[in-house]
Amino acid sequence: MKVKTYISTWLLLLVAVMVTGCVDRLNIPKHGSLGGPENYYQTDEEAEAALASMYASWRDLHYNWFFLLNCMSDDAWTGGGQRNDNADMEKLNEFNFGIEHSMIQGVYSGLYSLIYKANLIIDHVTGSSQMMRQAVAEAHVARGWAHFYLVSLWGTAPVVDHLLSTDEYRMSNGTPEATWAFVETEFQTAIESNALTTKSSVNDTEGGIHVTQEAAKAFLGKAYLFQGKYREAAEVLDEVIESGKYDLYRGEYNKLGHSSTNNCCESIFEINRVKNTEQAWNEFSQLFIMLGWRSSILTYQPGSEAANTIASGSYGFMSPQKGLYDAFVEMEGTDGYRLNETIRTYEQLNALGVMNVGGTPIVGNEGYFFWKTRLLKEDCITDNPGLQMLQWNNLRIMRYAEVLLMAAEAHIQGGVDAGKALTYVNEIRERAQLPALSAVTMDDVKKEKRLELCLEGCRYQDLVRWGEAEAVLGQQGKQIPSFTWTITDVNKDSPTYGEIVYDENGVTVITSHELTYPYKNTEYGFKARNKYLPIPLREMDVNPNMKQNEGW
């Protein structure tokens, strides 16, 4: 028995020494729970980590936010591989969605997730260091931006201005007036804190990684504009322009939105992504694989410009509507610089070596393709032809061209300074290689904004706030196009049947093309109820205090 006792005692001592040694080496200050949030956010490093988490939520929200806004515009057809390839996006595009729509739910909950991450910082980061003050200021901007979309898209979504206790989870509807006032206050608080960073110069590509002072002013100007506060909008947007920290990008226009222009002089705010092959999956996004042309229907002639520069392995969503192409032609002609940097016809694609496989129909297409969102090989962290989800293009939220056009609108609508409005619009036109105007009207601004910012999340909300959505979008979705073109094969009786015929320039010979509208809806188009989106079904199910928006 004594031997067993001695052995047990030595074992206990040995374990105690081992545990003590491990604790000492790991420098563990305490055992058990580290406590709640009140024990975190105490250092600059912790505040910066919380800020990174907030930006991650902003990044995660971007996909649904992008497609929600662009699908409901008259910029594009949903497209894809075949009808019902993505039914939720088609329903947005054709205005036959209901309160259970998953992408509407995704944006709604995603905005509140961003607000939650911002509230964690605002409520818990109380230090006075520059990093902590900056984190709080950026959180106010994020919270204001999220509420901007909640009020402009849903109208009656509630304001969440602090971390909620359990008895506050079932909030009742807000009012547009109160939410707009809160949005303004959030941006003003961030600006007046003088804690936000600012770019050192127009060519500073590092200073815009965080939300800057000027980005907060641009967001505030947009909020004023949406409320019809034109003089206030003109004043704050002029401050952004006159800061001298931003300019229109003067390189290849078709590279805007691609990796080579990440954080360029035109970037007001974008969510950053990194080219790092060892951590490529951290940059996973379906956005660019969705926007690239449909690889199962379009192939690239070996050795062609398309094969050398454009990545394959993408899904073919968002094809330009003919109305958008026609609007470009009306202003610029078929040889317009900006037109051909934005949209290409099927003949132009074919001349670059893009072929329609076997005359396969391209659903949701009228013979036009976005050039501005083509998927470039240089954008790929890893070029994976089977699954292109690893790109390092930053996720764009706002660029300087939008600021110029918002400022022009504010000056015209508010009767502030017609000379400034003319200067701003002519800057856009000069970059587009168009002649300068001698006078500018609101109609000019609307046309320039449609062309310059197509498929950038502006058009739908502009139509709604201008009171033009029902007239412009009222018939959208009534019928859906399908397009195909065929190329010449050698006569089937020839021993070389199946070989493709090329012309003297090495371009495949187009035999025929066909545009039809084979798909029709009985429910379609923007209606009065679409002024606001429906409160999502999931929210209505769990929150008896919420009332549904009118008409839903």
Image (cartoon, helix red, strand yellow):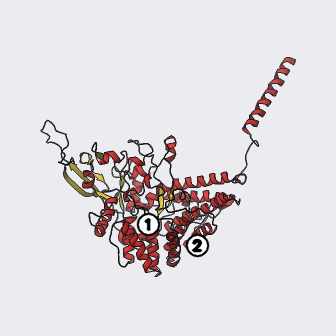
Near mark 1 (Cα within 10 A), the count class, few <14, some 14-19 or many ≥20, is many
128 left or right, relative to 271: right
Residue at 31% x, 66% y: name it.
Answer: 328
Residue 26 vertical placement versus 530 (above, below): above
59 left or right, relative to 29: left
323 left or right, relative to 11: left
191 and 155: which one is in front?
191
> Disc 1 residue type?
Ala
> Mark 1 against mark 2, which lies toward the viewer?
1
Q: Secondary structure at mark 1?
A: helix
> Disc 2 residue type?
Ala
Q: Secondary structure at mark 2?
A: helix
- On residue 28, the disc is none
Q: Which residue is mark 1?
A: 401
Instruction: Evaluate if marks 1 and 2 touch, with contact meaning CB atoms under 8 Å apart.
Output: no
Q: Which quadrant, please, contains the N terminus?
A: top right
Tell me, yes or no, if residue 55 can be seen here.
yes
421 and 367: which one is in front?
421
Q: Position of residue 103 (x, y in %)?
A: 47, 56
Tell me, yes or no, if residue 478 can be seen here.
no
User: Which picture quadrant has residue 261?
Assistant: bottom left
Residue at 41% x, 58% y: name it.
Answer: 256
Of the residues under marks 1 and 2, which one precedes in the sequence?
2
Q: Position of residue 19 (x, y in %)?
A: 76, 32
Q: Position of residue 437 (x, y in %)?
A: 35, 75
In whole angstroms, how far apart are the C-alphas of marks 1 and 2? Answer: 26 Å
Q: Position of residue 471 (x, y in %)?
A: 36, 72
416 and 107: which one is in front?
416
